[in-house]
């Protein structure tokens, strides 16, 4: 990995030159990407996530947006406390570290921080993981096999054994392929001393997310037996 930073006026770009070559801010602009006919898809969440091609890569662009009540004041501006404290910089570097460890996460491609006075806006680009479906979407249509729940539990355990705290472990941030489980969206994620309290908090956050999806989606394929299988695999039982 050959990590580079560049500044264009008040915009800071972080990227892996071995992966991306030299880049500019146009890769972070959905309007420009649309004009290039590069966008291949979109996903709606707190904002719009864009999937696009940038030969030879298939990439994912996410703009950082606030949630909760503060979003009514400003949905995408954050207080500037220095570049290293921005959410994009921290998530990009965390993903780079986790990817280097061989953990199943999206590979970081580039990040952009636009600094204006007391505030900043930010974006992150990661390499698309092919043929994945979010856990929550999968369960809307079909149940998981026992082995799938076991793989999810084992995957979370692997992250916890590597001291990785995921700040928002939920049914949307667990991605499933045919034979592998990935975790995504490490905004506000951290490396923390191993501690059963935050580890259990992570698990309970996921449990609440699954139960919420169950209440919102009739026929959602989740029950407490599934959760027990996940927990037993997490514990190595």
Image (cartoon, helix red, strand yellow):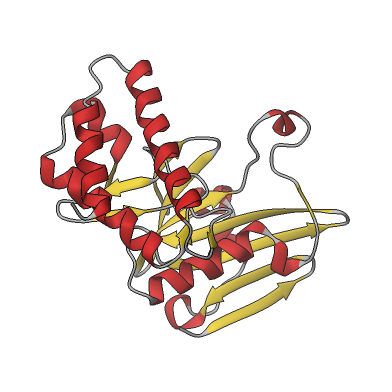
Measured as percent of width and height from the top left, residue 76 is found at: 69, 43
At 55% from the left and 81% from the top, the residue drawn is 3
At 19% from the left and 40% from the top, the residue drawn is 229
Which residue in the rendered view is the most extreme toward the top?
Answer: 218
Nearest the viewer among 9 and 109 is 109
Q: Is residue 27 visible?
A: yes
Q: Is residue 130 visible?
A: no
Nearest the viewer among 20 and 94 is 94
Asked where in the image residue 143 lies, by quadrant, the reply is: top left
At 46% from the left and 75% from the top, the residue drawn is 20
Q: On screen, 27 above or below 134?
A: below
Tell how many labels.
Answer: 0
Q: Quadrant of the N terminus?
A: bottom left
Which residue in the rendered view is the most extreme toward the right?
Answer: 117
Measured as percent of width and height from the top left, residue 107 is found at: 40, 66
Nearest the viewer among 153 and 85 is 153
Q: On screen, 208 above or below 49?
A: above
Q: In the figure, is residue 90 to the left or right of 59?
A: right
Measured as percent of width and height from the top left, residue 5 is found at: 64, 78
Asked where in the image residue 114 lies, by quadrant, the reply is: bottom right
Q: On screen, 29 above or below 45?
A: below
Measured as percent of width and height from the top left, residue 42 is found at: 42, 41
At 37% from the left and 34% from the top, the residue drawn is 207
């Amino acid at each position: 990995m050959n990590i580079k930073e560049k500044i264009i006026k008040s915009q800071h770009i972080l990227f892996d030159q071995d992966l991306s070559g030299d880049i500019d801010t146009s890769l972070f602009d959905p309007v420009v990407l649309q004009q290039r006919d590069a966008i291949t898809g979109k996903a709606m969440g707190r904002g719009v996530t864009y999937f696009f091609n940038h030969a030879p890569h298939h990439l994912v662009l996410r703009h950082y947006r606030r949630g909760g009540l503060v979003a009514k004041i400003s949905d995408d501006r954050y207080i500037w406390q220095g570049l290293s404290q921005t959410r994009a910089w921290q998530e990009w570097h965390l993903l780079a570290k986790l990817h280097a460890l061989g953990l199943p996460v999206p590979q970081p491609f580039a990040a952009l921080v636009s600094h204006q006075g007391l505030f900043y806006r930010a974006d992150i680009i990661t390499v698309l993981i092919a043929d994945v479906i979010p856990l929550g979407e999968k369960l809307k249509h079909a149940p998981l096999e026992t082995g799938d729940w076991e793989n999810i539990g084992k995957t979370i355990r692997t992250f916890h054994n590597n001291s990785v705290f995921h700040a928002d472990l939920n049914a949307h941030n667990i991605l499933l392929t045919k034979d592998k489980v990935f975790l995504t969206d490490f905004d506000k994620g951290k490396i923390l001393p191993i501690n059963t309290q935050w580890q259990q908090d992570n698990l309970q956050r996921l449990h609440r997310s699954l139960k919420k999806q169950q209440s919102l989606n009739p026929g959602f394929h989740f029950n407490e037996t599934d959760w027990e299988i996940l927990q037993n695999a997490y514990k190595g039982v």
